[in-house]
Structure formats: structure tokens, C-alpha cells
Amino acid sequence: MKMNVKKELDPRTVLGIVFIFITLGLAINKPLSSHILLLICNIYLITSKAYRECVLYSVIYIIIAGLMFYIYHIPNTTLALTIVSISYFVQKFVIAVMMIEFLKRKTSMPYVISAMQTMKFPNAVAIPFIVILRYMPTLREDYGYLKDSLKIRGIRTSGIEFFIHPIRSLEFMIVPILFRSIRVAEELSTSVLLRGIENYKNRTNIYPLKFTKIDAGYALFTVIAVSMLFYLQF
């Protein structure tokens, strides 16, 4: 996950927007509210010029919504409940990923860290969040290497293959990634601690933060969007 160096928005504005809509994505359960939330997230992605991601995540969401629409025609109750459960969590995950993509496009790691220090985030929150952001590029690289290794061995790794052979997919894909993730997460945590993240003294901030008219525009749109979602949901 390569983050931009240029600061287009104040990172505090971006963090607030991401937190609000990820929380709403978890709280909303009505179909109309969920569809409107997807549209709002698409608007944020379009403003950050993430057109490919916008189309990709929208297609995934629409496919899941289509499965949910035809769920009543499935006679097998167990299969229907399984599809509903998986679809529900995938929809929540798509919204979260879209907002993380917005965070990645609209700010940079130094500014995010600067914003969290300025807002006096507790280390129990700041350290895991920073480690997650730092870990994403490594996770993507490891996943690519693993897929290449499996292709050499003649093992297919498509999404359809996961549903056809879920146990085998877990064995070949998920388990190696989990073991690798544990090791890398420990290394990143150690690196963050060695850099003095737990030092409670005030630090010099070389990344100035300032709200602008663009931030005000985003904030106004967010307030309107949240109000509309609350009206539709509650």
C-alpha cells in the first residue's frame, strides 16, 4: 500500500471521515441505507481519483447484493444462512476497504502519525494503527509471492477455487499468510518501539497541520451524508 507524499487534506479530516463511515458501515443493516452508503463511499473514492478501485469494490458489492436478493429462492436453509452470513460480512468489509483506500490516497504516513500525535491518541490505539498501515504493503507482496509459488506447483488460486475447495484454500493460502503475518507484525512492533513511540515527551512536529476550505467542504458533505444515513436507518 503506497501512500502519497503530498497532503491534499488535513489528515485529521481524513481520519475523521474514515472512522465515521467505517463505523456506519458496521452499524447500518437496512438495504437502502447500505446502498446509499456505498454510493457515498464511491464519491469519496472518485474525489481521490481511485477509479479502478471504485469500480472493483462496487462490482463486488453489487454481486453480493444480488445474491442477497435471490436468497429466498434457495430451498436449502443451511446454505441460505451461510450465504447470508458471508454476504453480510463481505459487504461490511467492502465499505471498510473503500475508506482505507480513501485514507491512502488523500494523505501520507508521516501526516497520519503527526495527526495522531496532535490529537493525543493513546499509544494503545496509535501503535496498532501505525503497524497495520506499515504492514499492508508487506502483506500484499507476501500474497503475490505465495500465489506465484502455488502457480509453479500447478495449484490454482482463483476466487472460484476458494468456494469450490475452501479447506484446501485455507491450507495453501490463509495458513501461510497468518504465520508470516505474526512474524512480520512482531518485527514491525519492535521497530516502532525502537523508534521511541512510547516516549511520552512532546515531540517536534515537522509536518504542519492546518484546516483549509477544502477540509470545510469535505466536512460539510460528511455531515449531510451522515444525517441522510441516520434518517434512512433510524
Image (cartoon, rainbow, N blue to C red):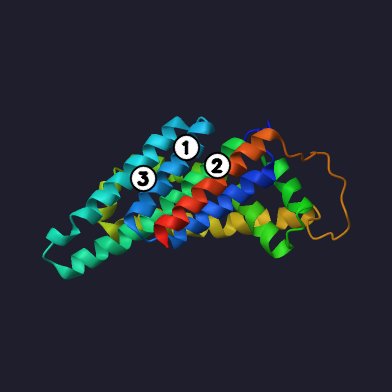
Any mark on residue 43, and which?
1
Q: From the top left corner, tell me how far across and down residue 228 is, in percent.
A: 46, 51
Tell me the crowding category of disc 2: few under 14, some 14 to 19, or many 20 or more residues within 10 angstroms, Cα based: few
Q: Name the residue under label 3.
A: 150
Apparent side of residue 233 relative to residue 117 in the rendered image (left or right): left
Q: What element carries label 3?
A: helix
Residues at discs 1 and 3 in contact (Cβ within 8 Å) = no
Name which residue lies at 42% across and 32% down. 52
Amino acid type, residue under disc 3 in the picture: Leu
Determine the image quadrant of residue 150. top left
Q: Distance between the residues labelled 3 and 2?
A: 46 Å
Query: How far apart in space, not on screen, are marks 1 and 3 (Cα)?
Result: 37 Å
The residue carrying pointer 1 sits among few (fewer than 14), some (14 to 19) or many (20 or more) residues within 10 Å by Cα, namely some
Q: Position of residue 167 (x, y in %)?
A: 30, 61
Is 147 rendered above or below residue 86? above
Tell me where residue 109 sits by quadrant: top right
Q: Nearer the viewer, mark 3 or mark 2?
A: 2
Q: Which amino acid does label 2 sit on?
A: Phe
Q: Quadrant of the N terminus?
A: top right
Q: Which residue is drawn at 46% across and 57% down?
A: 230
In the image, what residue occupies the spot 27% across and 62% down?
84
Contact flag, marks 1 and 2 (Cβ < 8 Å): yes
Q: Which of marks 1 and 2 is nearer the N terminus?
A: 1
Pointer 2 residue: 221
